[in-house]
Structure formats: C-alpha cells, structure tokens
Amino acid sequence: MKAATLRLDPALESALASGHPWIYRNHLPAHGLETGDWVRLQAGATRAVGVYDAEGQVAVRLFARERVPGTGDLAARVQEALALRRRFVPSETDAYRLVFGEGDFLPGLVADRYGRFVVVKTYSEGVQRAVLPGVVKALGRALRPRGIVRRDAAGLHPLYGEPPPPKLTVRERGLRFVANLHRGQKTGLFLDQRENRQKVRELAAGARVLNLFAYNGGFSVYALAGGAAFARSVDVSEGALADARENARLNGHADRHEAVRADVFEFLNVHEETYDLVVLDPPALAKKRGQLRSALRAYARLNAGALRRVRAGGLLATASCTAQVSPAAFREALAEAARRAGVRTQIVHEAGHAPDHPLRPEFPEGRYLKFAVLRVLEPIG
C-alpha cells in the first residue's frame, strides 16, 4: 500500500525510536495528508509507519517500523491479543476486553466481548477507516460471534452478523450481570475493574458495605458473593440502580442489598452511618491536563468523606480512572483525605487494570486506572 513520507525534525529521533505510539500535530511538517492515510515518518535514521487524523492533538498513531501493515498483519495482532486473554481471563467469564488499543499494538480502538457479541469503539477516525475493517474481519474469523457492532455517541452500528438485544446477561467469575450495550457506560460495563471487584469479594466476609458511585452494583454483588452481611449501592442514576437491583436479584442477594438514589457528594455530607468496608469508584474527574488541580481537590474531598464512613479497623477500597492523575498524585490525594478526616490509614493493596487491559511501558498514558485498599485507624492520642 502506498504511503507518503514525512521527514520530522531530527531532534525528534529519540521520541520516534522510543516506541511511543503517538505523534502530535505540532511535530508534523506541512503536508497534504487526509484522514485515514497511511504515512511514513522519518527522524534521523529512525522510521515508523502510522495512520493520519486531521482532527485532535494526536495526528498520527503508529503501527509499524518499516511497512504498512496488511490484513494478515492486523489478524496476527488480533490473534496475539486473543492468546493473552485465553491465558489470563478467569473461567466462567464471558465479558472482557479483547483488544486494548495501544496496549495490544492496535492504537486507537478497543473491542469488548459480551457473551456471543463484540462491541468495538474507535478513538480515531483515521483508524476507523484504515484499520477497523481488518480487525473486524479477524475477530469474526477467530470468534464466530453472533454479531460485531461499533458503538459511538449515535448508538450501535452493525459490522458483522446481527445486532445485540437491548440488554443481555453475561458472566464474570461465575456471577451474572445485565449489560446494556446500547446505553451503558463504556461499551456496556466497567470491565477494567474485574480483578478489583474480586479483591473486594475476598475482603467482604461478614462486612456491612457502602458502595459509592455504584453504577450497576458490580462491587456490591461481588461483596455479597463474598459473604457481606449487607451492601448499600449509591448512585445518581435510577437506570443504573435498576440494573444494580436486578444484578443483586440474579445472584440471589436481593434481600441483603439496598439501592439508594443520591448525589454522592451530598450523600456523604448528610449520611452518618459507618461501615466495615466502603467502596469509592467515581467517574473521571478531569478530561484535560488543565483540570488536574481541581480533580485532585475533588478526590481529596470525596475520599475524606468516605473515610469518615469507615469504622475504626475497617477498609476503604478507592479508585481513580482519571488518566491525568498519576499513581503518586492519587496517593498524595489519599494522604490529604486522611488528614482531613482525622484518621490514620495504611495502604494494604494497590492495583490497576485487569490483565485483559495490558500496558506498554513506553506508553504511560495507557495507565488510567488506580485502585487502592486502605485500612482505617483512629488517630494516635
């Protein structure tokens, strides 16, 4: 396949050689490229091949060093991704990430399995045009799903087979969850938190649990499956809470589960009950680097409120999915939260994404999820 060649400033050679999969717009010379064009880049003696986008900060997503990848090359990367899932996805699980974009050397797109259906999302119009057809073909041949759809703000777009129903039931570590592929968060469920939900399950025996920003009650269901005495799910969305109630029922825990519709910030201001285990999993609190400071203030405030709801000796399981917040910055926010709440804390567990969300060391931007379990103690007198 033909591809134009652009010569970059030689000072960018080390950046191009690093393996980082993005080239920013301000690094490109004048050109006549259009969205979806393959382009060869050269800086000094280093070369790379990628797909161009006319919009957004990231102008080129890199796929190879020397030649434009063909259908066979894309299929090989899909097979590598599927092999990793066969090795690391737990049994009795049929909802998980199949392709994690840059982490699986297929930048700009993700693909998730929900039972017999696959949902893909693209974060690059160029990748959608130049790469997605080959990936869909490879997924269809390898998995033989009932259907593959692309999801965007407008809804679902069939790419292969039949479209999924409005809701379907999937399994995760033997637990059952309803997934709304048409309107649910992400592509339907928060698949990246699977192993962190399992950690909560391991810690929940006999506990009274408060789950904040509960969405569909995933952490609550895992806690109840681990023997929690009671779980309260709090979220502002009635639709999400309806799914939480259904998930508790599907797994036989409806009698020990309560769903509360409330703004979490307001709930923490007025709710005084304490719990053995509190889970705090807010949505992303910043979209741009310039919003980092306000996001860190919000994390400190939220976690301080959550810590006040943990009885002495209990646990706070807390997460951040804000990409702009580094693991170190998140720990600093947790330290500030403990100071505000007037408690001592110990981090007893830290984690990130589940293994079906692999990370590349040369691409630190790929690590957006931080998860920590804190033991909460009274202050020393």
Image (cartoon, rainbow, N blue to C red):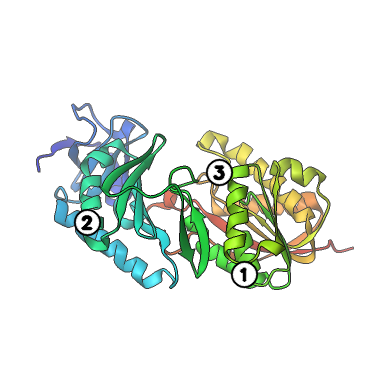
Crowdedness near tag 1: few (<14), some (14–19) or many (≥20) residues, C-alpha within 10 Å: many
Among the two numbered marks 1 and 2 on one chain, the one whose residue lies closer to the N terminus: 2
Left or right of 258? Residue 295 is left
Q: Given this view, does label 1 or label 2 mark the residue nearer the observer?
A: 1
Q: CA distance from mark 1 to mark 2?
A: 37 Å
Left or right of 58? Residue 275 is right
Residue at horizontal 18 percent and vertical 26 percent from the top: 32
Q: Amino acid at mark 2?
A: Ala
Q: CA distance from mark 3 to mark 1?
A: 27 Å
Regarding residue 141, the answer to whether it shows in the image is yes
**Is 73 above or below relative to 85?**
above
**Is 291 above or below relative to 270?**
above
The residue nearer to you, when weighing 177 against 197, is 177
Total labels: the figure holds 3
Residue beneath label 2, please? 138
The residue nearer to you, when weighing 146 against 205, is 146
Give how far across and how far down residue 60 sits, in percent: 28, 39
Q: Amino acid at mark 3?
A: Ala
Among the two numbered marks 3 and 1 on one chain, the one whose residue lies closer to the N terminus: 1
Residue at horizontal 20 percent and vertical 44 percent from the top: 44
Crowdedness near tag 2: few (<14), some (14–19) or many (≥20) residues, C-alpha within 10 Å: many
Among the two numbered marks 3 and 2 on one chain, the one whose residue lies closer to the N terminus: 2
Kindly identify which numbered label has been placed on residue 225: 1
Give how far across and how far down residue 165 sits, in percent: 40, 49
Residue at horizontal 36 percent and vertical 32 percent from the top: 56
Q: Amino acid at mark 1?
A: Ala
The residue nearer to you, when weighing 120 against 238, is 238
Give how far across and how far down residue 326 sits, in percent: 54, 50
